Amino acid sequence: MEMVAHNPTDGVYPATSDYVHAMEVRGAQRTLYISGTMGLDRSGKPGETLSEQLVLIWDNIRAILASAGMTVDNVVRQTSYLRDVSYAEENAAARVAALGGRSIPTTAVVVQTLERNWLIELEIIAAA
């Protein structure tokens, strides 16, 4: 499988260093769509802070990916649902760290979460 980032410079605003406009996936045989995943521990309890929830979310995502024989290297798209706009920078930093600096297409939306203490939820698409 090959992933090719597309960041056209003509007719569209420039991409930032942690973001790409589009990701072309060539030769993939499988696609995994991960439901919105929260920063909950194994008992279903959320982390108390955004930082704790981000660690739990990425641990949960790694476990879900592993169940499909994948790793974070297979992630090709992320949508973030943030309870507060002030969470955007820390969320982006957590994504960059989790992906080892690899950029992917992302969208972040500020929403009211289903539970007040859920600060963030991530949807992931992976391909292999």
Image: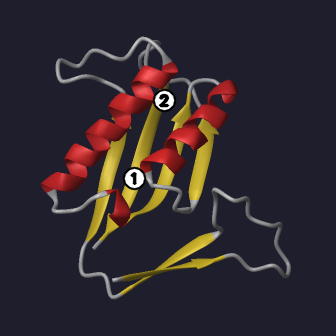
- The residue nearer to you, when weighing 85 against 5, is 5
Q: Which residue is mark 1?
A: 124
Q: Amino acid at mark 1?
A: Ile
The quadrant of the rendering that contains the C terminus is bottom left
- In the image, is residue 108 above or below residue 38? below
46 on left or right of 13: left
Which type of secondary structure does the marked residue at label 2 adopt?
A: strand
Which disc number belongs to residue 41? none
Q: Which residue is mark 2?
A: 120
Would you identify the image quadrant in which residue 5 lies?
Answer: bottom right
Would you identify the image quadrant in which residue 19 lies?
Answer: bottom right
44 on left or right of 105: left
Q: Residue at x 23, y 19 (%)?
A: 44
Q: Residue at x 47, y 13 (%)?
A: 116
Residue 33 position within the rendered picture, expressed as x and y whole percent measured from the top left? 32, 58
95 on left or right of 72: right
Q: Residue at x 74, y 64 (%)?
A: 15
Alpha carbons under labels 1 and 2: distance apart: 13 Å
- In the image, is residue 30 above or below residue 102? below
Q: Residues within 10 Å of mark 1 (few under 14, many from 20)?
A: many
The quadrant of the rendering that contains the N terminus is bottom left
Q: Amino acid at mark 2?
A: Ile
Q: Is residue 38 visible?
A: no
